Amino acid sequence: MGSYITTYMKSVEAALEDENTDWQALKREHLVQIEFIQHERLIHLIVTVMCCLLLFIGLCVFFMSQLIPFLIVDGLLLILDFCYLIYYCFIENSTQKLYRLYNRICAKAEPENKTVTDILTRKKLT
């Protein structure tokens, strides 16, 4: 999914540079893509929280029982949690970038409207 998001954002950047782009179609498509990635973000948030919860339970069991196999499982869960957190941060940051791209698309699609999107685009906050 990471390469998909990166490739998609590059294609939107290219479309924003092309003045022959159908802005309304791009806007609709972009909203659909944002929904897909938000769904992915939600799923990974749930999985990350569940893995962290399992790690916490495993640590509690280890400290109560002092059994080495629980420490090994906890070590593996710690590595898994770390990887999930890195990926979740990537998805979260990508979603924020998609929102900024959406603001730029809106500014191109409706240049006559004085909206927050237009103000943000002019101030280069996007």
Image (tube, grey):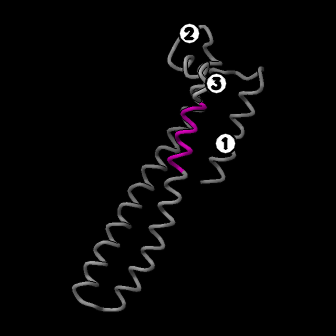
State the mark number for residue 25.
3
Relative to residue 103, is residue 94 depicted above or below? Answer: below
Sequence-wise first label, 2 or 1? 1
Which secondary structure is most common in the magenta stretch?
helix
Residue beneath the point at 54% across and 32% down: 31
Crowd tier of the residue under label 1, counting other residues whose Cα lies within 10 Å: few below 14, some 14–19, many 20 or above: some
- In the figure, is residue 16 to the left or right of 91? right
CA distance for labels 3 and 1:
15 Å
Q: Secondary structure at mark 1?
A: helix
Q: Which residue is mark 2?
A: 113
Q: Position of residue 35 (x, y in %)?
A: 50, 39
Mark 2 surroundings within 10 Å by alpha-carbon count, few (fewer than 14), some (14 through 19), many (20 or more): few
- Position of 114 relative to 13 (above/below): above
Q: Amino acid at mark 3?
A: Ala
* Residue depth check, mark 3 versus mark 1: number of the one nearer the observer: 1
Residue type for callout 2: Asn
In the image, residue 50 above or below residue 20: below
Q: Quadrant of the N terminus?
A: bottom right
Identified by mark 1, the residue type is Tyr
Looking at the image, which residue is at 48% across and 73% down? 79
Question: Of label 3 and label 1, which has the lower sequence position?
Answer: 1
Tell me, for residue 17, which label it has, or none. Answer: none
- Judged left or right of residue 43, residue 25 is right
Q: Residue at x 73, y 23 (%)?
A: 21
Q: Nearer the viewer, mark 2 or mark 1?
A: 2
Range of the magenta residues?
91-101
For mark 3, does the 10 Å Cα neighbourhood hold few (<14), some (14 to 19), or many (20 or more) residues?
few
Residue 98 magenta-highlighted: yes
Q: Is residue 111 part of the magenta span, yes or no?
A: no
Residue holding disc 1: 8
Residue 104, given in percent of the width and then of the height, sits at: 62, 25
Which mark sits nearer the N-terminus, 2 or 3? 3
